[in-house]
Image: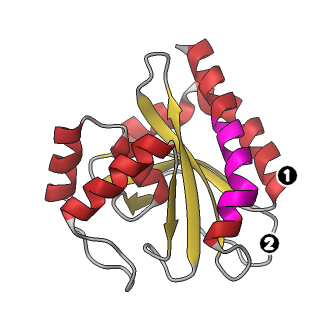
Amino acid sequence: MELGFAYLSSQPVWHLAQPVMEELVQDIHESSSAAVLDGEDIVYVLRVPAKKIMAISLGPGSRLPAYCTAMGRVLLAGLPEPERRARLERAPRPARTARTITDVDALLALLEGVRRDGHALVHGELEEGLVSMAAPIVNRNGRVVAAINVSAQDQRMPPDQMRKRLLPRLLESAASINTLMRMQD
């Protein structure tokens, strides 16, 4: 795992993606991260924090469950359906909050929506009050290889406001990184 993470984090695309994400964070004043799928978890490969008094201590190498995170749902949605189902079925899916969706069929239905919409929004499933929105990073073949997100507290940025104000900018940043990915393949 450590060798795999060292390889992923050393890839030139992350060095190229960092300025795109830094510009995104500067524009929206919210944190942004990039992650890849590893088994049933996501692993952070890059994080650009917003300048705030309270900072979340998630950095490269941090792991979170895929089923209840926006980046995880984007990454799972990018898999073929049988693999999506298999990963969800073998993953422990505890309810981390009262909002956490743990039912495999309900999650699969959500993942279809993520595939259709091209992004995921998760509100209060990983942690109370946390809103996160993610978009896919795809390689030249159109395969989802990573995800980027923006996250905020719902008191400051309710989900509808996040989608309205930040989604266009998130998708624009993902498209820029996707262009960089195609140039690196």
| Pointer 2 or 1: first along the chain | 1
The crowding category of the residue bearing disc 1, from other C-alpha atoms within 10 Å (few below 14, some 14 to 19, many at least 20), is few
Above/below status of 25 relative to 126: above
Identify the secondary structure beneath mark 2: loop
Q: In this rendering, does residue 95 appear at all?
A: yes
Q: Position of residue 86 (x, y in %)?
A: 15, 48
Above/below status of 149 relative to 146: below
Indicate left or right for 58 with 29 as reference.
left
Residue at the (75%, 58%) spot, across then down: 165
Magenta region's main secondary structure?
helix
Residue position marked by numbered label 2 in the rendering? 52
Q: Which disc, if any, is residue 156? A: none
* Quarter occupied by residue 131: bottom right
Residue position marked by numbered label 1 in the rendering? 27
The magenta stretch is 162-174
For the residue pair 178 and 116, the one nearer the viewer reads as 116
Q: Position of residue 19 (x, y in %)?
A: 77, 37
- Amino acid at pointer 1: Asp
Q: Position of residue 29 (x, y in %)?
A: 81, 61
